[in-house]
Amino acid sequence: MRLYFLRHADALEGANDASRPLSPKGKKQSRALGRFLQRAQVQFDAAYSSPLARARQTAELLLDTCGSAKQAKLGLSNALLNETSEFEFVRWLESLPEANHILLVGHAPTLAERLSRMMGLPDAESVRLPKGGLACLETDDRREVTLKFFISPKVLGV
């Protein structure tokens, strides 16, 4: 199984944090990542996003661009919010159905902290996940993982 941890792409500023949409740059970042995954022949079986607008929009654009929108219905989950405890996140992750490729779209700082913990790094801040940054972990048990790749929009020229 491969887990794809994606921090939402660039978003507009706004007073209501939950409804802040992607900026034009964020939309471009999401599509560029989708094209990268399409070229890598990644097809998601499952996809989950934080319910916040910028994360949901990032996931929708990426899934549509890489061609996984029909196979992987996007589920919204509070487990991908910063307010969710590590224990609740791990319990949620373990409850997900078996799949080959699972997309998880969330926020800083917890998404990178969870990546660090899953990779067994001693410092929870060892991983810096930029906006639109994507890390792919391979796992058999959702506990021990191997980092397969890490990519940012900057590497893709966005």
Image (spheres, grey):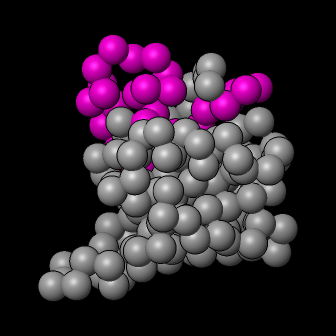
Q: Is the magenta stretch mostly helix, strand or loop?
A: loop
Magenta stretch holds residue 141: yes
Is residue 19 found left or right of 105 in the rendered image? left
Quarter occupied by the N terminus:
top right
Kindly indicate the quadrant of the structure image that contains residue 137. Answer: top right
86 lies above or below 12 = above
Magenta stretch holds residue 124: yes
137 lies above or below 59 = above
Is residue 145 found left or right of 118 in the rendered image? right
106 lies above or below 120 = below
Residue lying at 62% horizontally and 20% vertically, measured from the top left:
144
In the foreground, 75 or 64: 75
19 lies above or below 26 = below
Q: Give the range drawn in magenta.
A: 114-142
Quarter occupied by the C terminus:
bottom left
How far from the left and from the top, in percent, is residue 103?
Answer: 63, 54
Residue lying at 33% horizontally and 84% vertically, measured from the top left:
19
Is residue 102 found left or right of 106 in the rendered image? right
Residue lying at 33% horizontally and 56% vertically, measured from the top left:
83
Q: Can residue 39 be seen in this view?
A: no
Q: Can residue 48 be seen in this view?
A: yes
How far from the left and from the top, in percent, is residue 25?
Answer: 34, 72
